[in-house]
Each structure stands twice: as C-alpha cells, then as structure tokens.
Amino acid sequence: MTSNIQTIPLQITNSITNAITVFTAENKQAAVVIIFPALGVKANYYRHYAAALAKQNIHAITVDHRGHGHSNIRANRENNFGYREQVEEEYLAVVKKAKSLFHESKIIVMGHSIGGQMGSMLVSRYRYLVDGFILNASCSVHYKGWGNIKGVGLLLFAALCNYTAKLLGYYPGSFFRFGGTEAQGIIGDWYCTAATGKFIARGSEFDYEKAIREVSIPILAINYFGDTSAPYGALKCLCDKFQSATIQIHQIKPSAHNKKYNHYSWVRKPEIAMELVCNWVKQL
C-alpha cells in the first residue's frame, strides 16, 4: 500500500497564507489525522510519521505553525500573534480544508506538545468539526502539575521567556534552546497557562476553560516514559480539564535496550505507538 503526497496552498486571511501536506491512504473514506506540531518544529519533521499512518490506511496531514515553514510570515516586532490567531484562524482553516478534501472521513486532531495544548482549545471551540483528539507527548504547562521543584523551575523559565519576548518584540528560541523564533503573543499566552493553568487566547472573548470542560469527543492521551518535557503528571493535569470526555491514557514504556524515551522519540520511530494509534483511530 502506497501513499500519495501532495502539498496544498492554504489561504488563512487576505494577507496570510500557509500550506498543508496531505499523505493520502488507499481507502478514500479512511479517517484523517491532522498533526499539529511542537513549538518551533516544522511540519516536515513529521513526514515519516504521516507516511507511516498512510501506509496503515489512515490519511495524514501535516502543517506548519504560523511563522514557520510554509507560512508566508515570520515572527518579529512587526508580526505579532498568539493563541487566538493560531487556533481561530490557522487551525480552523486546516480542519475546514481537511473536511473539504475528505468529506466522508472522520477527522482526528493529533497535537504534539504545544500543538496538543492549542489543539485542546481547537476541539473545545470547534468540536462539531472534529471526531477525535490525540494528545501525543503533550501536557499542561501549569507549574502546579510538574511537582514542587520542577514546577517552580518551569514557572521561572516561562517568566524569563515571556520577559525576553516582550523586550525584543519576539522570542529568540535558539538562544534558549527551546522552540524557534516565536511571536511574543505565543510566548505570552504560553506563559499565562504556565502561571495560571488556564487556556486564554488574548484578544478572544471565547471562554476556552468552560468549553474544554464540556468536550465529549473521544480522547487518546499518550505519554512516553522518560519524556521530561511532557511528564505523566502534567499530562494528567491537562486531561483533568476534559471533564465530559472519554479519555484513554497510555504510558509507553521503553524496550529492554532503551532506558527511556524523549519528547521526540515517537516521531523518529513511528512504530513505538503506531499500533495503539491506528487501532484507536479505526475504532472510531
């Protein structure tokens, strides 16, 4: 079974464009998994994982966050944006495009790291467009979910990132070795979650916290033992927000020759949890 790979331009607003890369499976009515990336990670990084899904007869779509890859703008003093633009413009446009391409298919959102955090916001506001949600190596960044010592360290680091982004007008991810060149608004909203535990898209009047509690679509949450960037307790902290959803939480333990996984192991080695993901998706 082979997949057809196609990059399709996407008009987000009058002046902002992006693109999605579609990995088409053999069965046209197969489910679609949309992969939202981690902070600063380009869509191309997920190409092998998306191709593996297509070989398992599941359509896959990868996309860059605004300011990266195929996006026609870059984050700087002149171009600022945050969760509101990413969720209510970029993510929404991607899901709508997926539904137009595969109008008979189930739509599943898979979020990696911050992609899972903003993906949580997407499925809470636009739940009528999504049939399932996968948190893959994602978690809450609320410092209280990380334990006393690590939590304080996370909060201080998030505050430093936020202060730097405000000072420069953008966030220099390469300097901190965390993320890429990011918009001040993205880092500001991320810091807000770290400090308060709440998902707030500044500039939006929508109550995401209330909406998340009402989400009822099926959710698969995957944690990888040893992933210090998305620990199990912080994943549970995020899952607890979904008070009305049916959630399956799985911790993947390494094989005998590996002591632990890191935050990106599942992308580089799709076989780690591919059977789990495929079985869950096909049961929908």
Image (cartoon, grey):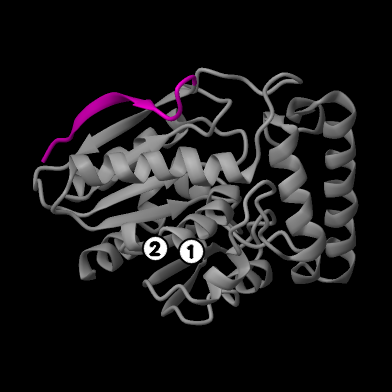
Q: Quadrant of the N terminus?
A: top left
Asked whether residue 221 is drawn in magenta, I would say no
Asked which secondary structure carries label 1, the reply is helix
Residue picked out by circle 2: 127
Question: Which residue sits at x=35%, y=46%?
Answer: 95
Q: Quick check: can you spot residue 31?
A: yes
Please report contact status of discs 1 and 2: CB closer than 8 Å, yes or no: yes
Position of residue 256 relative to residue 40, above or below, is below
Left or right of 220 on screen, residue 79: right
Asked whether residue 11 is drawn in magenta, I would say yes
Position of residue 61 relative to residue 144, above or below, is above
Position of residue 234 relative to residue 121, above or below, is below
Mark 1: few/some/many CA within 10 Å (<14, 14-19, 20+): many
Question: Which residue sits at x=37%, y=72%?
Answer: 218
Question: Which residue sits at x=29%, y=24%?
Answer: 7
Asked which secondary structure carries label 2, the reply is helix
Q: Position of residue 69 (x, y in %)?
A: 50, 22
Left or right of 151 on screen, residue 54: left
Q: Position of residue 144 (x, y in %)?
A: 80, 70
Residue picked out by circle 1: 124
Mark 2: few/some/many CA within 10 Å (<14, 14-19, 20+): some
Q: Quick check: can you spot residue 255?
A: no
Stretch in magenta: 1-15
**Label 1 – label 2 distance at C-alpha:** 6 Å
Q: Quadrant of residue 12?
A: top left
Q: Position of residue 65 (x, y in %)?
A: 53, 34
Q: Position of residue 78 (x, y in %)?
A: 72, 19
* Front-most of residues 186 and 57: 186
